[in-house]
Amino acid sequence: MIPNDRKFQELLLYVASRCEGDPTFGATKLNKILFFADFLAYGKLGNAITGQPYQKLEHGPAPVRLVPLKRELVPHAAVEQQRDYFGHVQTRLIALREADLSEFTGAEVAIVDAVIRDLCDQNASGVSDLSHKFLGWEVADLQEVIPYESVFLDSRPLTAKEEERAAELGAERRRS
């Protein structure tokens, strides 16, 4: 998958604009929204929205190229604002222009909007905790890129029907 830097930057602006009124929106929440949107799109659509690689960091997944790509936006298309948030420094990305969504499909925008909506009640700790439950993040080493295919991993126990089907497939394979 080839990362699309321009599309990623427009996604940054779109998320910043959509989350402007969210008092819990800061750098951590931005990282997690981007991560969940890209990985959910990969799972549902067969392609990530931006194709950017995400790495395992201590506090959850983050885009590998976030800093340089965000730096290209500031100060022309966005600014970063720091403020106190319950005794912590919160760094917010503020969009200075509307995002250009011409490269996005309707399904991609709908996924981003759904992720934003699903995470709107979560603060930085909440979204980090949620991202730590993602198996791709759990099994990766620190600073290792998390494979998009890990979106298909599941830790739930198999149902009796699934175990039966696996046994059938195994038996068929042994016969051939």
Image (tube, grey):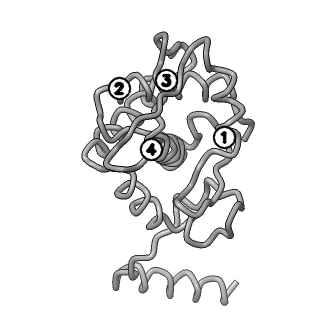
Residue assigned mark 3: 105
**Between tags 2 and 1, which lies in front?**
2
**Between tags 4 and 2, which lies in front?**
4
**Between tags 4 and 3, which lies in front?**
4
Please provide percent x and percent y for residue 25. 37, 38
How far is mark 3 from mark 1, CA to CA?
17 Å
Give whichever of discs 2 and 1 has the lower sequence position.
2
- State the quadrant of the C terminus: bottom right
How far is mark 2 from mark 3, CA to CA?
23 Å
Quick check: 39 left or right of 125? right
Looking at the image, residue 8 lies above or below residue 169:
above
- Label at residue 52: 1
Helix, strand or loop at disc 1?
A: loop
Q: Amino acid at mark 3?
A: Thr
Residue lying at 35% horizontally and 26% vertically, measured from the top left:
20
Q: Amino acid at mark 2?
A: Glu
Helix, strand or loop at disc 2?
A: loop
Please provide percent x and percent y for residue 21. 29, 27
